[in-house]
Image (cartoon, rainbow, N blue to C red):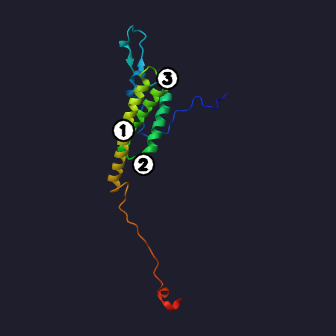
Amino acid sequence: MTIPAGGDEPIPGDLPEWAPTLGRVAIYVPHRTLAKSVLSITGSQDEYRFTFDQTTTPPASSVLSLIADGVAWVSALVTPLHVTSQPLASLVAALWAAISLERAWPNDDQSLQRANDMEKQLNTMLAALITANNRAWDEEEGEGEYALDVLPVWSFPVPDLRYDDARYW
């Protein structure tokens, strides 16, 4: 029986090439990728994986969904996205996914505070992305906001001289 509210949804496959990877999101929240060693007695022998898989909390499929949402958010706010702005857009989408991850799965008392601090960074980076994207398009297209150096051309029919004659009316 299928669950009408969802269930195991497929991983979004239509992400652009600039979309961040699981590892890029994990850089912002490395404590989420800590693999406990079964042979260790102390926590110092545990290892950071710096990526998400099915053994991490949250699993990779959930993080990929957050990445897709972050890419959609950035794409909606910065459109059209210039090629030179794609690395910064990837960084902003990764940070957005990490913030969402911290808010959705808090694992300690500082999770929400970390999310708030990262959100301040996100707002600054998003403003920088928009500025850099506008500047890149201005340099490519000309001056002004996405301006093209094209002037309007008006075309009027040849005037009929009989309308200028007072005797016509």
Of the two numbered discs 3 and 1 on the same chain, state the one appearing first in sequence. Answer: 3
Q: Of the numbered discs in the image, which one, if any, rests on residue 80? A: 2
Give SS at disc 1: helix
Residue found 36% across the figure and 43% down from its top: 85
Report the amino acid beneath label 1: Met
Question: Pointer 1: residues within 10 angstroms few (<14), some, or many (20+)?
Answer: some
Asked whether disc 3 touches disc 1, contact meaning CB atoms under 8 Å apart, the reply is no
Left or right side of 160 for 150: left
Give SS at disc 3: loop
The part of the image, by quadrant, that contains residue 8 is: top right
Compared to residue 152, the image places residue 119 above or below, namely above
Asked whether disc 2 touches disc 3, contact meaning CB atoms under 8 Å apart, the reply is no
**Distance between mark 2 and mark 1 Cα atoms:** 17 Å
Residue found 38% across the figure and 47% down from its top: 82
Report the amino acid beneath label 2: Pro
Q: Could you tell me residue 155's position as x and y percent? A: 44, 73
Q: Could you tell me residue 87's position as x and y percent? A: 36, 39
* Relative depth, front residue between 57 and 130: 130
Q: Of the numbered discs in the image, which one, if any, rests on residue 54? A: 3
Question: Pointer 2: residues within 10 angstroms few (<14), some, or many (20+)?
Answer: few
Q: Which label lies toward us, 3 or 1?
A: 1
Of the two numbered discs 2 and 1 on the same chain, state the one appearing first in sequence. Answer: 2
Q: Could you tell me residue 143's position as x and y percent? A: 33, 56
Mark 1, residue position: 125
Left or right side of 3 for 21: left
